[in-house]
Amino acid sequence: MGEKARMRGVAVLLPAAAAGLVHGWSWWCLSADSAPPGPVALVGGAVLVLGAAVAYGALRGGSGGVFGALAVAVGLLAVVAAADRAAARPDRALCVVRQIEERGSHTAGEGAPASRTVYRHVLTCPGGYPTELKEDHAVARAGGEIEVAYDARRRVSPVLVGDTSPWPAFLCAALLLAFATLVATRRP
C-alpha cells in the first residue's frame, strides 16, 4: 500500500474519529461532575475542531481537501451543538415571565442571512436562577408562567421543559461528516 493510499485511508476515518472525540469532549465539559473550567473547555474544543479540519485538509489535499475540511469543521461544530442540546438539565423551575425584550438583527445587502428576532424573557424563578430565557419566539406573555429546565452548575443555557432535542444538530453533523468521508474516498 502506497503512502497516498494510507493518507487517503486516514482521511476517510478522520471525520468519524474526530466526531467521537469532539462529542466525548463536549459531553465531559457540559455534563460531567469533574468538568474542566470554561476557558480550558473552550480552548480544548477549538483545538480539536480546528486540528481535525487542518489534518483532513493536509491528508486529502487539493480542492477536495479544502471543501472536506470545511465540512469537517462545520460538522464538528454541529456535534458540539447536539451535545449541548442533549446535556443534562436536571433541575426544573416554574418561573414567571416579568418582561419580554425583542431584539432584531438586521442584514445588509443582497444574499445576506435573513433578519432574525430573538426574544429575551426576563424571569423570576424560585431560588433566583435562571434569570432569563432566549428563544426565537415569545413563549409566554409578561406575567405568564413557564416551566424551565436548567443546570444549577450553569454550564448550559436554560431551556423550556421538553425543548432539548439534539436530533436536528445531529442530522446536520451526520450529513456534513458523511460528505467529508465521501470526498476522502475519491482519488485526487
Image (cartoon, rainbow, N blue to C red):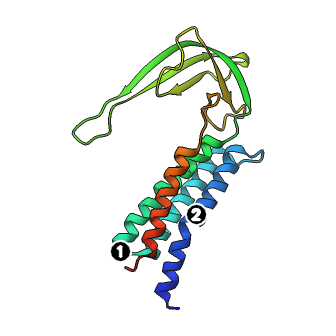
Q: Position of residue 152 (x, y in %)?
A: 72, 31
Q: Is residue 136 above or below residue 62?
A: above
Q: Which residue type does callout 1 highlight?
A: Gly
Q: CA distance from mark 1 to mark 2?
A: 21 Å
Q: Is residue 178 above or below residue 115?
A: below
Residue lying at 61% horizontally and 36% vertically, measured from the top left: 164
Q: Secondary structure at mark 1?
A: helix
Nearer-N-terminus badge (1/2): 2
Q: Which residue type does callout 2 highlight?
A: Ala
Q: Secondary structure at mark 2?
A: helix
Q: Is residue 135 left or right of residue 114?
A: right
Q: How many marks?
A: 2
Task: Identify which residue, 174 or 99, lies in the foreground.
Answer: 174
Residue lying at 57% horizontally and 8% vertically, measured from the top left: 143
Q: Is residue 91 left or right of residue 111?
A: right
Q: Position of residue 27 (x, y in %)?
A: 67, 49
Q: Which mark is residue 34?
A: none
The C terminus, quarter of image: bottom left
Q: Position of residue 61 (x, y in %)?
A: 40, 75
Q: Position of residue 33 (x, y in %)?
A: 78, 44
Q: Which mark is residue 18?
A: 2
* Residue at image mark 1: 62
Task: Identify which residue, 137 or 65, lies in the foreground.
Answer: 137
